[in-house]
Image: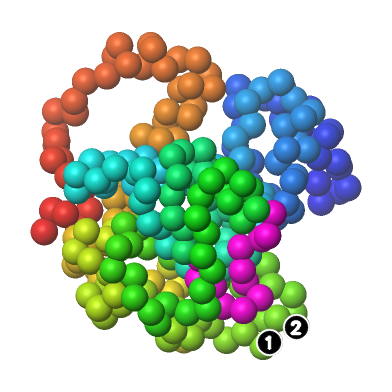
Amino acid sequence: MAKGESLYDTSRVMSGYCDAIVMRHPDQGSVAEFAAATNVPVINGGDGPGEHPSQALLDLYTIDKEFQRLGKSLKGAHILLTGDLKYGRTVHSLIKLLSLYDPLRFTLVSPPGLEMPTALIDLVTSRGHQVEQRESLASNFADLDVVYTTRIQKERFTNEMNESFQGLSHDFMVNRDFLDQRCSQSTIVMHPLPRDSRPGANDLNVDLNGDPRLAIFRQTDNGIPMRMAIFATLLQVDELIEKDMRPVRWFVPDQTGTLDR
Ligand code: ASP
């Protein structure tokens, strides 16, 4: 592509080499354009600020597993999405996917200029969900079921924005204080990772690392079976795999992530 080849040509060439393609590209819409030129399955691994559907599926799988553990149901759940909701593609795909389910309550909290695109809010409200937008986390959220935090996607900022934006202010930081004071013992904390741990970024705080409410590493673990399932389904070998599945003999974890503590 650096030599000027089009998405169409690259797609046609690559399709002859393999049975499925996972594509990640900096431009929104590029994966759909690439997929339109081929017959092999194309999985969107992230198209710029557009979407990240496999992350949304693993996020939904995580929410479902965590809710089962906590004896909760998805129906009517209250989900907070916070951080960079404008360029964060994971939240775009997640809110779209969740909007296919029974009515939910969404609270969206982002710094000015990084709000969720209006088209997505309109889609979600047209499907019967409640959406509230707030400007900071400094208010009560006692009935929150999920806090989903995202990294500021600085790589997608224009130069002008880059200069004026230093990082998230303390008003947006999800940490132990926020969870203890404004949420409940059964609120789970998610993040698509990577979290930005540099000073001043104020991304999801490491002081929650030993807290069982932090589900981020259970999320990453869930990414493996979810991506395996996506491949198996698209390549139509899901039944074959199910027939051959058996527990591993060397290590059978009951649970993974911080719940082990
Ligand atoms: N890993 C996620 C993505 O590819 C989230 C992020 O980069 O902040 O979009």
Q: Is residue 158 left or right of residue 8?
A: left
Q: Is residue 132 left or right of residue 178?
A: right
Q: Is residue 254 left or right of residue 215?
A: left
How packed mark 2 is, by other alpha carbons closer than 10 Å (few <14, some 14-19, many 20 or more), is: few
The residue closer to the viewer here, 4 or 172, is 172
Q: Disc 2 designates what residue?
A: 160
**Up-down relation of residue 60 to residue 171 (above or below):** above
**Mark 2 vs 1: CB contact within 8 A:** yes
Q: Magenta stretch containing residue 129, yes or no? A: no
Q: Position of residue 118 (x, y in %)?
A: 68, 60
Q: Is mark 1 within 8 Å of ligand 1?
A: no
How packed mark 1 is, by other alpha carbons closer than 10 Å (few <14, some 14-19, many 20 or more), is: few
Q: Position of residue 204 (x, y in %)?
A: 38, 72
**Up-down relation of residue 88 to residue 41 (above or below):** below
Amino acid type for the residue under numbered disc 1: Glu
Does dot 1 land on a helix, a strand or a loop? helix
Amino acid type for the residue under numbered disc 2: Glu
Q: Position of residue 205 (x, y in %)?
A: 34, 75
**Up-down relation of residue 107 to residue 5 (above or below):** below
- Residue range in magenta is 108-119
**Up-down relation of residue 148 to residue 170 (above or below):** above
Q: Residue at x 37, y 62 (%)?
A: 147
The residue closer to the viewer here, 64 or 261, is 64
Image mark count: 2
**Mark sitting on residue 163:** 1
- Whole-Å distance between the Cαs marked 2 and 1? 5 Å
